[in-house]
């Protein structure tokens, strides 16, 4: 089945759905840092409102706007919004198999698990206190949740590590340190898990994807100009790896920011997009979500928008 889809995908092209997102009158998104999709096809977007990136957002206080938007994938209409006056600097978003929304805040140094309606279920890390022990993170970037409820956290802008937790939220183990060798990271920025349980990490500043066994043993790395500098990644039900290239490699437009699709062996299936503001272009592709119907939603942090892509024969 996977091989059949790979053959289809290699003969297909990605195209953008112009005008998909129906923003409420007079409103805009802020910097879009996280995107995820639930099993019903609703798209969850984590954005920063009027807040730009800042080194110490605690000084500015919580973002006043609702930072999480739930949007119909079919119509582009905003269904609900929540998370006002909660977050300091939104970053990663992951929707698990139960529909729970997992968020990371690099200002609060915390990881959160919410119900889709915005009900807070659990929190990890100490608010506004960074650290590198079992109880703390330091600007954590992303979360990947397994079917059994256990999860990995990429941690992050300061700590160069991946941390594994059990389904009941207890620390299990970690790996990684700062550097460019196997199992080392310079900003582990995105994380995903394949059907075999292997862990894929977007090692952003090392311009590579690293792949590990479920217990953190190094398997392989991918460095490829086709995906430049990886920011976000997801693995689809189709057995393909989708990578959001943040657009810092190469250093000049136009071939800077795009979506690249690979097989699980690292072979490039296709790349889509370039730097810019038009439909199908990105200023800085930061994260993406994959829908059950095959739609792809790419969050553009500098472009302050989400675009919907589809496979076309």
Image (spheres, rainbow, N blue to C red):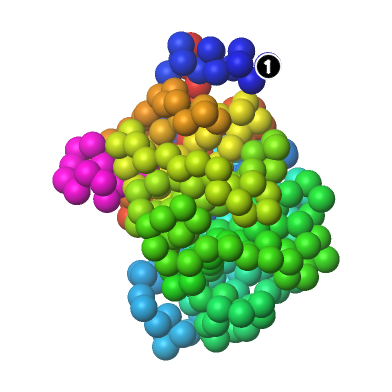
Q: Is residue 76 above or below residue 207?
A: above
Residue 137 in the image: x percent, y percent?
57, 75
- Nearest the viewer among 61 and 261 is 261
In the rendered image, residue 121 lying in the magenta stretch gets the answer: no
* Label 1 environment density (alpha carbons within 10 Å; few <14, some 14–19, many ≥20): few
Q: Residue at x 69, y 43 (%)?
A: 197
As helix, strand or loop, the secondary structure at mark 1 comes to loop
Q: Residue at x 49, y 47 (%)?
A: 210
- Point out the image quarter for the N terminus: top right
In the rendered image, residue 246 lying in the magenta stretch gets the answer: yes
Q: Is residue 167 above or below residue 274?
A: below
> Does residue 17 appear left or right of residue 35 in this picture?
left
The kind of secondary structure the magenta stretch mainly shows is loop
Q: Is residue 242 above or below residue 50?
A: above
Q: Quadrant of residue 227?
A: top left
> Does residue 46 appear left or right of residue 167 in this picture?
left
**Residue numbers of the magenta segment:** 245-257
Residue 165 in the image: x percent, y percent?
72, 64
The answer to whether residue 200 shows anywhere in this view is no
């Amino acid at each position: 089945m996977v091989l059949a889809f790979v053959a289809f995908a290699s003969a297909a092209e990605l195209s953008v759905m112009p005008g998909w997102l129906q923003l409420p009158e007079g409103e805009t998104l802020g910097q879009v840092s996280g995107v995820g999709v639930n099993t019903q096809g609703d798209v969850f977007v984590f954005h920063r409102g009027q807040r730009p990136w800042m080194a110490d957002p605690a000084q500015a206080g919580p973002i006043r706007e609702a930072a999480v938007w739930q949007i119909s994938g079919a119509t582009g209409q905003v269904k609900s919004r929540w998370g006002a006056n909660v977050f300091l600097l939104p970053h990663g978003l992951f929707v698990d198999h139960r529909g729970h929304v997992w968020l990371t805040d690099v200002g609060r140094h915390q990881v959160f698990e919410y119900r889709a309606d915005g009900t807070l279920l659990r929190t990890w890390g100490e608010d506004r206190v960074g650290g590198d022990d079992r109880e703390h993170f330091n600007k954590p970037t992303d979360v990947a949740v397994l079917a059994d409820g256990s999860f990995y956290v990429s941690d992050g802008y300061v700590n160069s590590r991946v941390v594994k937790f059990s389904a009941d939220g207890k620390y299990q183990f970690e790996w990684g340190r700062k550097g460019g060798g196997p199992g080392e990271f310079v900003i582990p920025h995105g994380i995903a898990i394949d059907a075999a349980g292997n862990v894929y990490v977007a090692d952003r500043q090392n311009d590579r994807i690293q792949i590990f066994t479920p217990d953190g043993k190094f398997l392989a790395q991918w460095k490829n100009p086709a995906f430049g500098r990886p920011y976000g990644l997801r693995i689809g039900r189709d057995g393909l790896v989708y990578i959001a290239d943040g657009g810092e490699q190469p250093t000049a437009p136009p071939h800077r920011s795009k979506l690249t699709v690979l097989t699980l062996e690292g072979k490039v299936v296709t790349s889509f997009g370039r730097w810019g503001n038009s439909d199908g272009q990105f200023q800085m592709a930061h994260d993406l979500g994959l829908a059950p119907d095959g739609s792809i939603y790419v969050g553009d942090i500098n472009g302050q928008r989400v675009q919907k892509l589809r496979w076309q024969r």
